[in-house]
Amino acid sequence: MTTSANWQVTDDDREVIGRELSGFVPDRVFDAHAHLHRAEWWASPPPIVVTGPFEAGLQTYREHLGRLLPGRELHALHMAYPFAGADEATLAAANAWVASQAAQDPLGACLMVVPPNDDPDQVRETGRSLGVRGLKPYHLYAALERTWDAAIPDYLPESLMAVADAEEWVVVLHLVRPRGIADPLNQHWVRRYCERYPRARLVLAHCARGFNPYHVLEGLPPLADLPNLWVDTSAVCNAMGVLAALQIMGTGRVLYGSDFCVSQIRGTAFSVADTFLWLDEEHAPDAPAHAADFALPLVGVENLRAVRAAARLAKLNDGDVGALFWGNAARLLDLAPGS
Ligand SMILES: [Zn+2]
């Protein structure tokens, strides 16, 4: 394997962070979408895992994300990095390990990764015993050949949503299907789940999978009236996706999230036609003639630049920015006032 600049923070990164982000990101940050992992969970780990530390727990998270957010007080809602093909025992151990990591931070919280076929009573009992604040379903666990086409109940069955409702849990959902939130079937299930399970809080990750902002502009407005629907900004590298989320949902239900360790990938995502593309070290064009020293950015830095640009265009005041980086997550998770 060639050397990788994943996980590395260069002088060029630090220059951008200093110039663009140091005056923007508040002193304390509650990151509403932060994965942790151990490389042993995968039979064949993805490049971001292979190129990084074997174990990415709370200390690794603070160390590495702290390089993107220097000097900030950092707390997070943690969840295991979802991995395909896991046996039950590995997944159970992963959830328990993430809970033990989150518990080392008095303000930390965690979610439990749940496959759709998990027994709801067992999920409730395990979740209670681990002290989780909710669930992290993922399309990879849907019993389909092409999970990118999964409907929400294929990976988040109603029975688990009912548990989230009874426990007043948070559910962080990464939508799939080609048009994301603009897909009528996704809209149908988001509305039905939010209305039928009003004590659960449904967070649509990545600005409602706003890697293509036109999907957000088209698909999120009909759902903005749902009081228990939230979005997080994690890994979105286009400002319009974040701006659309802020303007459609209002400033009170948008959460900053890093998507650590995706934040440490060299790459970016952008909108193309009616979909989006990801660039990374394995899929990157040559440096263009007009920028011969071009190097792929860190996803986490590109995301923060997009969040800042969106905040400026939406004319957010300091209070709004504080809510985006802290107050909204504190409300979502019922953190004690003043914490
Ligand atoms: Zn994620």
Image (cartoon, helix red, strand yellow):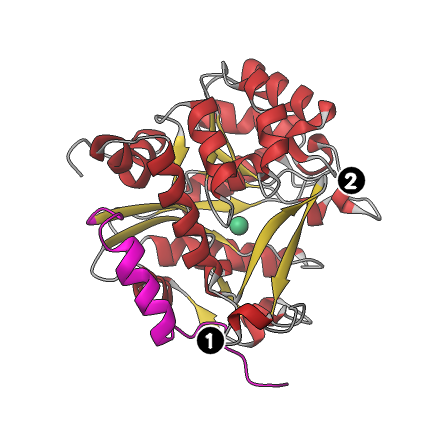
Indicate yes or no: mark 1 CB to ligand 1 under 8 Å. Answer: no
The residue where tag 1 is placed is 53
What residue is rendered at 50% in x and 18% in y? 224
Can residue 338 be seen at all in this image of the molecule?
A: yes
Question: In this picture, which residue range is highlighted in magenta?
Answer: 1-27
**Circle 1 — which element?**
loop
Vertically, is 58 above or below 145?
below
Residue 129 spot, x, y in % from top left: 43, 44
Amino acid type at mark 1? Pro
Residue 318 shown left or right of residue 144 in the figure = left
Disc 2: which residue: 149
Ligand 1 within 8 Å, label 2 CB:
no
Indicate the quadrant where residue 183 lies.
top right
Please state if 102 lies on the left or on the right of 279 as rendered.
left
Residue 59 visible in the shown view:
no
- Give the amino acid type for the residue marked by disc 2 in the picture: Asp
Give the crowd class for mark 1: few <14, some 14-19, many >=20 residues within 10 Å. some
Magenta highlight on residue 283: no
